[in-house]
Image (cartoon, rainbow, N blue to C red):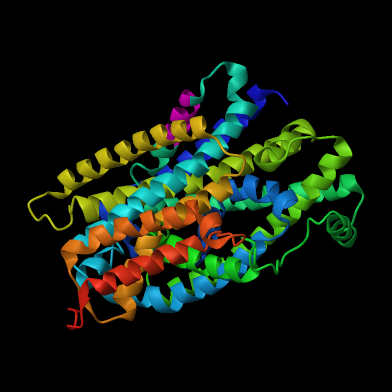
């Protein structure tokens, strides 16, 4: 299909987003930017968060990984459900009781100022790395599909997309994102369903026949029972639960949307309903992956991994499917980037700069600082996407899970220690503990063959990281009752 025509659809889609942003961002304040004035509709938040949780990586990388790992990723998804239940009935009541704008304020109230800064700093690092990895994957596809034909360099493509995101999040923040995420999730899931139906029709198969064909090739295996394998179901389910608790429940981007809902009860309904829709969506993405490999065999397509879905959608399907794929892909891109930049802006302004604690700053001055921080994070995103372009990877989903296991572990340890124990830490030593834990994990991961033989670590390295942080905090704590 003509790159110019594809690009025109991208522009039209963006203009629609800009219209939504203008309508929702009118008369916005810092309060609406950070937490949407606590007036967001829980159903909109739940549906929009599905798009944020899926992202472009799920859209491309999860189906592309099916030939290598089958439906094993659904083991992680089962863990997600356990994690979301924990968030709904353990973390959310805590956040609402303390009336938090930034969830990392809990760490200051419970453990101390250094702990608070450390948790916020690790979130900033985690979200920058994770969000830019997701952004890179989709930008790279758009570059190959559209912008290369216009002679636009990769860095300029990234800059254009980041500028587009800035335009519709600059004023409204969370208040706008709740609505744009809903639109984007709708487009993404519609694209997924249309692609599934099209491939089934062209393979002349029904659902049962396609499952049989996938099973014959080993694509549809869900549970893996070898304890030494990184795909072992116990490891994957546990990792999924802890990934969700940390990457959603202890993540300012995701919780920023949840605490923008007016009541705790509605926020809990949001999390539980979102977990159900998310799980079904991931299962459908895995099913699509199996279909893509069956279709690739029929069409003689040789691409695999992250390149499979784009190659089939853009080169081996009718133009209308190519358009749907591009719109769905952009719909997967924007929620993972716009929310990240907004949440990073919130965390840096509130937790690092402390603009809400500074009574000497006027609202106008606070807004100016917030806007400058917002622009700065967009520039940081540009730099990291270019770094990922140099590094590159066959499967970004594995890269993101690996990064999360290192950067979210200390956050998991900090929150777990604060919630489970009534001990007071030596706050000055907390940053050293939180920096040491990922280093220990790196050594364990790097030398795992020498230390553990055939036993392979997967995403459960996050749990080990959190446990090391937890034990380190215990060693620098005393049994004195902490200040509530």
Please, which residue is most extreme toward the top here? 151
Instruction: State the extent of the magenta-drawn residues as a range.
Output: 155-164
Please, which residue is most extreme toward the front here? 450
Residue at x 69% of width, y 67% of height? 226
Seen in the picture, residue 372 relative to 44 is either above or below; the reply is: above
Q: Please provide percent x and percent y for residue 460.
A: 52, 64
Quarter holding residue 470: bottom left
- 272 vs 149, left or right, is left
Residue at x 18% of width, y 66% of height? 427
- 446 vs 418, left or right, is right
Numbered marks: total: 0
> Quick check: is 372 in the magenta stretch?
no
Q: Is residue 113 visible?
A: no
Residue at x 18% of width, y 54% of height? 354
Looking at the picture, tell me which residue is in the foreground, 203 or 48. Answer: 203
Please, which residue is most extreme toward the right here? 204
Please, which residue is most extreme toward the left here? 360
Q: Quadrant of the N terminus?
A: top right
Q: Quadrant of the C terminus?
A: bottom left
Q: Please provide percent x and percent y for residue 339.
A: 42, 50
Q: Please provide percent x and percent y for residue 366.
A: 18, 47
Q: Is residue 208 visible?
A: yes
Q: Main SS type for the magenta part? A: helix
Q: Please provide percent x and percent y for residue 202.
A: 88, 44
Residue at x 28% of width, y 74% of height? 474
- 430 vs 54, left or right, is left
């Amino acid at each position: 299909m003509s790159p110019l025509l594809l690009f025109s659809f991208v522009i039209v889609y963006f203009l629609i987003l800009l219209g939504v942003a203008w309508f929702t961002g009118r008369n916005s304040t810092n309060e609406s930017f950070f937490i949407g004035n606590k007036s967001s509709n829980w159903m909109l938040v739940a549906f929009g968060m599905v798009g944020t949780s899926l992202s472009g990586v799920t859209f491309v990388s999860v189906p592309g990984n099916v030939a290598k790992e089958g439906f094993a990723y659904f083991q992680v998804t089962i863990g997600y459900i356990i994690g979301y239940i924990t968030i709904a009935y353990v973390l959310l009541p805590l956040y609402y009781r303390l009336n938090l704008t930034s969830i990392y304020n809990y760490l200051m109230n419970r453990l101390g100022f250094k702990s608070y800064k450390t948790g916020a700093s690790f979130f900033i690092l985690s979200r920058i790395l994770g969000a830019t990895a997701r952004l890179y994957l989709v930008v790279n596809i758009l570059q190959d599909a559209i912008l290369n034909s216009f002679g636009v360099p990769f860095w300029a493509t990234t800059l254009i997309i980041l500028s587009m995101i800035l335009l519709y999040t600059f004023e409204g923040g969370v208040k706008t994102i709740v609505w744009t995420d809903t639109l984007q999730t709708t487009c993404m899931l519609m694209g997924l369903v249309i692609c599934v139906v099209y491939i089934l029709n062209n393979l002349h198969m029904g659902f049962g026949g396609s499952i049989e064909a996938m099973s014959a090739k080993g694509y549809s295996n869900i549970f893996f029972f070898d304890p030494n394998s990184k795909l072992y179901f116990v490891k994957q389910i546990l990792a999924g639960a802890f990934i969700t608790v940390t990457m959603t429940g202890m993540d300012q981007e995701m919780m920023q949307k949840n605490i923008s809902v007016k009541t705790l009860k509605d926020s809990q309904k949001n999390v539980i309903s979102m977990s159900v829709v998310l799980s079904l969506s991931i299962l459908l993405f895995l099913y699509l992956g199996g279909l893509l490999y069956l279709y690739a065999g029929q069409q003689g397509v040789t691409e695999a991994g992250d390149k499979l879905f784009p190659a089939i959608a853009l080169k081996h399907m009718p133009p209308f499917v190519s358009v749907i794929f591009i719109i769905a892909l952009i719909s997967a891109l924007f929620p993972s980037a716009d929310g990240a930049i907004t949440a990073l802006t919130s965390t840096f302004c509130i937790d690092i700069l402390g603009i809400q604690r500074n009574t000497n700053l006027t609202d106008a001055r606070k807004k100016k600082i917030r806007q400058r921080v917002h622009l700065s994070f967009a520039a940081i995103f540009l730099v990291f996407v270019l770094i990922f372009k140099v590094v590159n990877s066959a499967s970004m989903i594995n890269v993101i899970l690996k990064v999360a296991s290192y950067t979210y572990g200390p956050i998991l340890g900090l929150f777990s220690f604060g919630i489970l124990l009534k001990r007071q830490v030596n706050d000055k030593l907390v940053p050293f503990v939180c920096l040491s834990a990922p280093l220990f994990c790196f050594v364990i991961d790097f030398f795992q063959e020498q230390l553990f033989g055939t036993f392979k670590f997967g995403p459960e390295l996050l749990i080990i990281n959190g446990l090391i942080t937890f034990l380190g905090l215990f060693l620098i704590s005393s049994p004195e009752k902490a200040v509530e």
